[in-house]
Amino acid sequence: MTLDPLQINEIRATDPGRVADSWAARRRRPLLADDGRLLLVAADHPARNALGVRDQPMAMASRTDLLGRLQVALAVPGVDGVLGSPDVLEDLLLLGALDGKVAIGSMNRGGLQGAVFEADDRYTAYDPETLDRLGLDGGKALMRVCLDEPGTAATLEATGHAVSALAERRLPMMIEPFLSRFEDDRMVNQLDTDSVVRSVVVASGLGATSAYTWLKLPVVDNMARVMDATTLPTLLLGGDPHEAPEQTYAAWADALTLPSVRGLVVGRALLYPLDGDVGAAVRTAVELVHGGDR
């Protein structure tokens, strides 16, 4: 049965148990495709109060519009799955869009964009026990290291515990690390090569084991030196797209040739392309990650 996003409200109001039943019935697949690569669409931004795309501060505010874009993206052959907060993943689950797809649950959404407590990035969404019980395929954590903010210590500790707990369940933990600082009352991620390298080495050492740890890293200058800082499998981030699409795609293509880089996890750059053609943007990403045989 194919549902329209507008029908989700009725199900949530009258049959909330369908969410758990749908997780139990979901057809799962291995994390990596046959070629050892992975392309995920990211959709966990709204839960952290991050709704903007380029110069549109409320671009991701419409849930029906976001779900429509996600359905288009997930229907493109070669898209392996999606990363999202519980509400978004449950909407997609009820729409039947997660069958045979990888589903990664976003865990810490408490460091709201623009908040005075942004550095204290609490784990307010998925937890390891729930990810395992529902049959999701792994967890994701945003880990911003802000050396001037005491709240960073709690985030590091909580992330270490989450890495260990997921590893006990043999589930991957995808850490998105940044060295960050406050500039004009805004937390800004430092995207120079040295800062990204520092974030990589801190993230790699969290938890009692790194056996199931993955990294999600921005594409910056000298990615070869960034990737030389780790042996952990890595996915490249899309971020908020400001450059021309051709420049973005070229940067992804270069970085995808590096050892340890396994693919892409991209949200806004694919879901809100400049020309509005979600399918075309996603097909370009599929070709970059998996090649032209899809």
Image (cartoon, grey):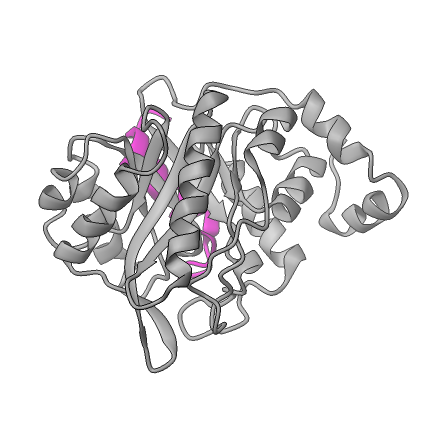
Give how far across and how far down residue 185 sits, in percent.
38, 80
| Image-quadrant location for residue 26 | top right
Left or right of 52, for residue 127:
right
For the point 51% across and 50% down, the residue is 108
Quadrant of the image for the N terminus? top right
Give how far across and how far down residue 288 sits, in percent.
28, 38
- Nearest the viewer among 230 and 10 is 230
User: Is the magenta region chiefly helix, strand or loop?
Assistant: helix
The magenta segment is 270-294
For the point 38% across and 55% down, the residue is 153
- Nearest the viewer among 181 and 12 is 181
For the point 68% across and 44% down, the residue is 91
Give how far across and how far down residue 112 sits, in percent.
51, 64
- Please say whether residue 285 is one of the residues in the magenta stretch: yes
- Please say whether residue 71 is one of the residues in the magenta stretch: no
| Image-quadrant location for residue 80 | top left
Q: How many circles with numbers are drawn on the protein?
A: 0
Quadrant of the image for the C terminus? top left
Left or right of 59, for residue 246:
left
For the point 61% across and 20% down, the residue is 27
Give how far across and how far down residue 257 sits, in percent.
16, 35
Residue 29 higher or lower than 204, as above or below: above
In the image, farthest residue toward the right: 14
